[in-house]
Amino acid sequence: MSASLPSRPDLNWLKNRAKDRLVELCAIDPAAKLADAQKDVARHYGFPSWRALKAHVDAARAEVPPRTPNQEDVVRAFFEAVGTGKLDRVRAALDHAPALVHAVGPHPFWGGRPQALHVAIESDQREMFDLLLERGSNVDGVNDGYMGWSPLLLAVHRKRAEMRQALLARGARIGLAEALVLGDDARVDALLVAEGLPANSPNDGTWLHFARTTHALDRLLALGAVVDRKDFWGASPIEALSRTGPAGTPLVAHLVARGAKAGAAELARMNDLVALERLDAAERLAPEALKAAVDFGHHELVRRLLAQGADVNGRGNGPAAETPLHSAAWNGDLAMVRLLVEAGADTRARDRQHDGTPLDWASTALRITNNAACGTVAAFLRDGDRA
């Protein structure tokens, strides 16, 4: 089955999805064209071509009366206030328009169409989260416009333990994705017996992406899950599991034993020095491996890779093509920032999507992730303290 479009699909948002998809396709095949990416997006939503998808969107918009002027801007501004912790502003907005707590709209910081509760969880705004629940937010969320990510799935994935408990205490539904990331094998087994393996998983990948136990991996593989199928964003199950860090090591090994391949980036995320050393130097020292080690805060591994010749200013292969210093700044990892700067990282480098420096990334992360450590990193980069 295909993913569902929002009831009021936005063509510009779909065009941006296609542009993002083109970047991913070009990483695999440099000859890929925008038309290929558009066709991928169309098929994701069950249409044979981009033309058919566009015709459907145009017809849907023609059949529904126009929105109140600037409604999308109102929702986006509301979501931004949620994500940046503006409690008084959000409270006043809800007093004036209580239905905003249920609104689905454009994400204030990146793509997709979430609800306010999704944004509060992502931005780690606990007081905001509580306020939204008090005002009637649906703990299960309306998730079709957000690649199937429920508030509970987000809370577990983002390691928001208190929010997770609050959602469960209020009766949040535990579907297959949630049971998998919770590592609840008994519930996974019960759901698979009762419902079978659903055709669609969040991110349009496989359910393997969300497994957190070897038992769950075996059950999913036995039911036909494909070991190397990538999700909409180009991530394989191996990559997704490696992003759980060292805890993913036995899961990655389990899939490798069943035919999947773990590359340098996956091994670096898990801090697997022994396996990394078995790779040839070109793969081990590629920018993706160094960035993965930076992303997951493996300081000694970063030192080792730099000492072996990894490029401290090597660019990532995503749309932003950011440097390792950008990543460390976003994470608020001052020790990593110092390490990279001492190794010659360019503090003035700009990413290729937002045209931001590492200082810009730290400042933005402070605002939208509520991570106070990013403020310390921003001060270090701004003041030029190299002590």
Image (spheres, rainbow, N blue to C red):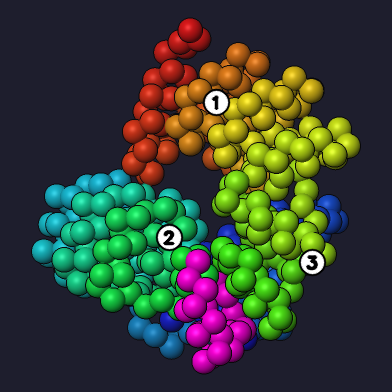
Please name which of the two marks, 2 or 3, marks the residue nearer to the observer.
3
Asked if residue 168 lies in the magenta stretch, the reply is no
Q: Quadrant of residue 343?
A: top right
- Residue where numbered disc 2 is placed: 156
Res. 194 in view: yes
Q: Residue furthest bottom?
A: 194
Question: Tag 3: Cα neighbours inside 10 Å, few (<14), some, or many (≥20)?
Answer: few
- Residue where numbered disc 3 is placed: 258
**Side of 76 relative to 306 (left or right):** left
- Looking at the rendered structure, the number of numbered marks drawn on it comes to 3
Between 312 and 48, which is closer to the camera in this rendering?
312
Question: Tag 2: Cα neighbours inside 10 Å, few (<14), some, or many (≥20)?
Answer: some
**Side of 80 relative to 325 (left or right):** left
Mark toward the start of the polypeptide (1 vs 3)? 3
Between 296 and 108, which is closer to the camera in this rendering?
296
Vertical placement of 280 versus 40: above or below? above
- The circle on residue 336 is 1
SS state under label 3? loop
SS state under label 2? helix
Marks 1/2: CA–CA distance: 26 Å
